[in-house]
Image (spheres, rainbow, N blue to C red):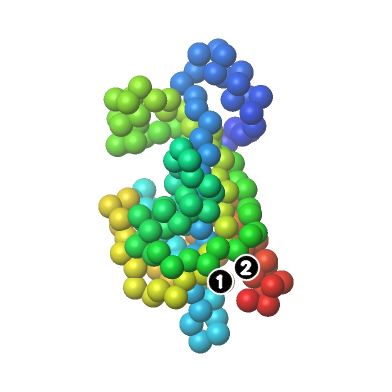
Amino acid sequence: MLSIPVFKPLYFLLKILGFPVVWEISVGAVVFRMEDDKRQYLLLHYPSGHFDFAKGHIEPGETETMTLMRETEEEAGIGDLKVFPKRTNIRYFYVAKGNEREKRLKDNKAIWIFKQVHFYPAQTEMRDIRISHEHIGSVWLPYEEALAKVTFDNAKRVLTEAEMYLRSQGK
């Protein structure tokens, strides 16, 4: 990922100048389950090698909760979620590569992506999951191990905020 400021004025400037940019909003879930009174967090392994959370684009007519429920079902086969109201927001910029780049170009979509993602902690009772074609694996880990495993600093912040919120709620 390129390290550039991710804020709307820069996005609008680049768009006006004709750069292939898009501002996308997604929603994700920091999924956890309880095992022996300890939280186990679900991390999905992506083909590019990184570990992260289930997330995806908001479809027309969906609320944020509806999106995270749909994406978690699609990406991990988890349908029983209790969503908590703690919302953590991240922003990042990337240039589409590989299959994503090809698909975007074919669909006449921008390849420079300014991404804003809203994450919510969500509890499940499920242990066995079914990953989608978007992933190459998954793992359930306690907080400290999950924190060491997630790849990006944004994901580390999201996980830490979820954990601190859940502790403050006595969960």
Residue 37, by quadrant, is: bottom right
Give the residue type at disc 1: Tyr
Q: Position of residue 19 (x, y in %)?
A: 49, 18
In the rendered image, residue 73, in percent from the top left (x then y), is placed at 38, 58
- Which residue is identified by label 1? 143
Q: Secondary structure at mark 1?
A: helix
Q: Is residue 24 visible?
A: yes
Q: Nearer the viewer, residue 60 or 75?
A: 60
Quarter of the image with the C terminus is bottom right
Whether tag 1 and tag 2 are in contact, CB under 8 A, the answer is yes
Q: Position of residue 9 (x, y in %)?
A: 66, 24
Indicate which label's residue lies in the foreground, 1 or 2.
2
Give left or right: position of 123 versus 9: left
The residue at which mark 2 appears reads as 163
Q: Mark 2: which amino acid?
A: Glu
Dot 1: few (<14), some (14–19), or many (≥20) neighbours within 10 Å?
some
User: How many residues crowd around disc 2 within 10 Å: few (fewer than 14), some, or many (20 or more)?
Assistant: some
Between 114 and 130, the one nearer to me in the picture: 130
Residue that extends furthest to the right in the rendered view of this protein:
168
Judge left or right: residue 143 versus residue 129.
Answer: right
Query: Which of the 4 image quarters holds residue 127?
Result: bottom left
| Residue ID at (30%, 36%) | 99
